[in-house]
Image (spheres, grey):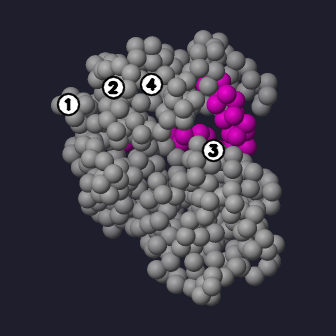
Amino acid sequence: MKSIAVAAALITLTSACGGGGDEPAKTADGKDVLTIAVWAYDQTPEFKALFDAFEAENPTIDIQPVDLLAGDDYAEKVTTMLAGGDKTDVLTMKNVTDYARYGTRGQLADLTDVANGLPKESYRGLDSYDLDGKYYALPYRQDFWVLYYNKKLVGDADLSNLTWDEYAALVKAAAKGEGADKVYGAYHHVWRSVVQAIAASQNGGDQLSGDYTWMTGQYTLTKDLETAGAIMPWGTANSQKVSYDSQFSTGKAAFVPMGAWYSARLIADIAAGKHATEWGVAPMPQPAKGAGVKTFGSPTAFAVNKNAANSEAARKFVEFASGEKGATAVAKIGIFPSFTNDAVLAAYAGVAGMPNDETAKKAFAPDEIMLEMPVSDTSSDVDAILKEEHELIMAGEKAIPDGLREMGERVKNEVG
């Protein structure tokens, strides 16, 4: 197995694999080549764990990752690939919004027969891939958001039941220093979900509705932290393409709200000696105490490209990754899988380096997980508008009320 950079590789793969219906490419030692599009392969350990496990079960297949590198631009690159007739066999579906776009455009192979044969009661997130009774991807990972914290920077504060007001006070207290020595109380990544999906999951908002006044409180809190110098300015993070790991793993931020997937990278990097961050996990803060832990998340899946050069091996891999063997492979490195049973959950709980105190246990067992973005034939168009207006608000080019009003008007007028 070897990694392939996308810019040079796609043309090579397309010509090497031939058109639809051609024989799959083979390695020099006669193995069938299976190409899989991923993002940031070296920083996303779940891919290697899955690929190694699959190859061990299927020694005649050689997986060649097509690494699209930048995670934030992954969807745009896949969109371009598919529009150009690319024949990469398997595509990682980073979120259900992009999946809905590719699925409704007829760019993915139909996996309904496989999905209907699965024990659906053992899967989390499988229903999110139901497009009018059809399935074009199968999930292997089920994420939800938690609050990461640096033990040395936060101290012994009780983080098990924070409100957003209490969180804001801790973040402001933890911020210190100036210039190169600046330590932020928290790092909030530039994604719109850090504000909008959190608000939707905890305030009952509907991101497809065209009414977004329920986001006001979360935007107000975020902008207040920015004004106080407690979090990195959104404009700086966006223009400099700052990564959340670069802030947390270097002790530049005490808190980072992020998906549970980040645990696997922290565990792997610490084991490799890349840093020695003493970290923990707490539940996401809530608007008020007593309503349980509400957060958001999204499954991640693999789909078979409708133009796949090796569709047979591609379907075999997607089914493997979503099943018990794939779930066990990712659980062992700290990724919460979509498929679970007692053995898989035991493998996840037993990962060396995974926080297992009572606060972490509460974080890893939220009471409610709302889908990051509802699945509909309008999700992709609404998502684009919400992203654009989010960036204008966070860049300071629109006041919060004006941005939310424009957001609603655009969704109603442009999407309907």
Nearest to N terminus: mark 4 or mark 1? 1
**Residue 304 as seen in the image, left or right of residue 236:** right
Mark 4 vs 1: CB contact within 8 A: no
Label 3 to label 1: alpha-carbon separation: 36 Å
Q: What amino acid does circle 3 point to?
A: Asp
| Residue located beneath label 3 in the image | 73
The local secondary structure at tag 2 comes to helix
Mark 2 vs 1: CB contact within 8 A: no
Residue in front for this viewpoint, 295 or 61: 61
Quick one: label 3, few (<14), some, or many (20+) residues within 10 Å? few
Label 2 to label 4: alpha-carbon separation: 13 Å
| Residue located beneath label 1 in the image | 155
Expressed as whole percent of the image width and height from the top left, the position of residue 24 reads 71, 79
Nearest to N terminus: mark 3 or mark 4? 3
| Residue located beneath label 4 in the image | 232
Residue in front for this viewpoint, 69 or 196: 69
Expressed as whole percent of the image width and height from the top left, the position of residue 335 reads 40, 56
Label 4 to label 1: alpha-carbon separation: 21 Å
| Position of 48 relative to 158 (above/below) | below
Nearest to N terminus: mark 2 or mark 3? 3
